[in-house]
Structures are given as C-alpha cells and as structure tokens.
Image (spheres, rainbow, N blue to C red):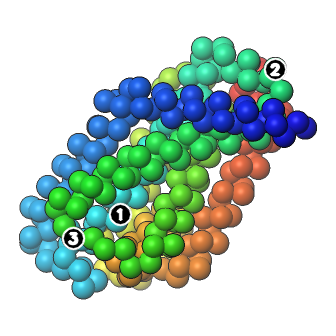
Amino acid sequence: MDLRLNWVGFKTLLRKEVLRVVRIWVQTIVPPAITMTLYFIIFGNLIGRRIGTMDGFDYMQFIAPGLIMMSVITNSYGNVVSSFFGAKFGKHVEEMFVSPMSNATIILGHVCGGVARGLMVGTLVTVVALGFTNLSISHPLITFSIVILASLVFALLGFVNAVFARKFDDIAIIPTFVLAPLTYLGGVFYSISLLPEFWQRVSLGNPILYMVNAFRYGILGVSDIDIIWAYMIIIAFILGLFSLNLALLNRGIGTRE
C-alpha cells in the first residue's frame, strides 16, 4: 500500500466533502441552527419556565449540551449518507474504487468530512445557545473528545446506511425511524433519574444516552451515567462500525452489485 498516494487521496476526499458543505451552506449549516433556535425558544424558554431547574441547573442550561450534541450527530450522519449514496447514484464511486486509494481511505475521507460538518454545525448551535443561556466548559478535554468521538460513530453509521441504500428513500428510513427516536429518548430533554427504575434500565440500552450525558458532563459537570463506560461504549462502536464498513467495501456489498 502506497501511504503517500493514500494520503493524497484522503486529503482530496476530505477537501471535496468540506467544500461541498461550505458551498451549499444555506442547506447544510443554516437549517440545523434555525431548528435548534426553535428548540431553545419552545423547550428552553417557554416550557423551561414551568419546569424550573434540573440537576441543579436552569432548564435552558441543562438541555443546551443535549441540543448541541443532537445537532452534531444528526449532521455527521446526514452528510456521509447523502454524500456516499450520491456517489453511488452518480456512478462516480467506481472512480474511487479503481484509484490507488484503499477502501479504508475511502471510508476515512467521507467520515472525516461528516465529522467536519458536524463540528461546524455544533459550533454554530453553541453560539446560538450562548444567546439563550450561560455555558462554561467544566472539563474541556472530555467535552472536545466526546463530541469528536460521537460524530465519528454517526458518520460511520451513515456510511453503513449509504452502502445498503438502493434509492433515495432508503437514506431517510434510519434517520426518521431509528435515529430521531433514539435521540429524543437519549436524555436530551430530561434526566433519566426522573424515570421509573424499569425505564431507567431500558434507557441504558440507548447509545445516544451515553454521548449526551458525557458531553453534558464535560460542559456542566453532571451526568446520569459513568463517563468511563461512555468512552468504552463509544470507542467500541467506532471500532465495530469501521470494521463493518471495511468488510462491506472489501466484499463489494452495495457498491459492485
């Protein structure tokens, strides 16, 4: 394997993905910020006044980390699934496969592009959040590492969806029927300590819960789950999903049929 050629291929793919996001920023960056603004106004400002405090914080402060994380993971996922499926649909994915790039490089180029979009949207949503509440980062290393690792997980998951997708409708099924419910039930708007014991145990099976709570711990210093467990679960997902994507490309599943 020629590392130099793969490095050039990776940089080219990453540059293409970032330019794609920036070029159509009105579609890729602005809408999530507007959506999150509505969440802050409705849930944080209007409903939050009735709720009061949660885990010792103003409700607006409590939901801010969850909303930031929600925007990061949904946009990391959406960028990769739309980009790689678009390459399949346009038939130019074949050009990548006949190039000197390895399959791992193809995956990393698209995934890092998804992470870049997730971080751009997350940064903008953070700026929006600061217009509604005060946020100070309690644990900077945890905050930044969790947001990058979480975006990696969903960028890799978006790649899996893109590999199996055969039509445009297929790239909307998982975000609508899987990702959205898991996000809303992942502790974005509430602490699972408020749930009955049975539903607390059920919630522990939701991977987004660990990401949201670890990110909230990084900013506010409070969490419903053990941070070490959060890191272990997130890293396990990254390794498992990357291995799955590599196996799918090596076998040509969804790409050479």
Q: CA distance from mark 3 to mark 2?
A: 51 Å
Residue 134, which numbered label?
Answer: 3
Q: Residue placed at 53% from the left, 58% from the top?
A: 148
Q: Residue placed at 65% from the left, 59% from the top?
A: 237
Q: Position of residue 240 (x, y in %)?
A: 72, 55
163 sits left or right of 170 in the view? right
Q: Position of residue 160 (x, y in %)?
A: 64, 40
Q: Pick the quarter of the image with the C terminus.
A: top right
Q: Residues within 10 Å of mark 1 (few under 14, many from 20)?
A: many
Residue highlighted by disc 1: 66
Q: Residues within 10 Å of mark 3 (few under 14, many from 20)?
A: few
Kindly state the secondary structure of the residue where label 3 is placed.
Answer: loop
Q: Pick the quarter of the image with the N terminus.
A: top right
Residue highlighted by disc 2: 98
Q: Nearer the viewer, mark 2 or mark 1?
A: 2
| Looking at the image, residue 249 lies above or below residue 37 | above
103 sits left or right of 88 in the view? right
Q: CA distance from mark 2 to mark 1?
A: 42 Å
| Looking at the image, residue 214 lies above or below residue 4 | below
Q: Are marks 3 and 2 in contact (CB under 8 Å)?
A: no
Q: Residue placed at 9% from the left, 70% from the top?
A: 49
Q: Amino acid at mark 1?
A: Gly
Q: Residues within 10 Å of mark 2 (few under 14, many from 20)?
A: few
Q: Position of residue 97 (x, y in %)?
A: 78, 24
Which sits in the foreground, 230 or 218? 218
Which sits in the foreground, 233 or 119? 119
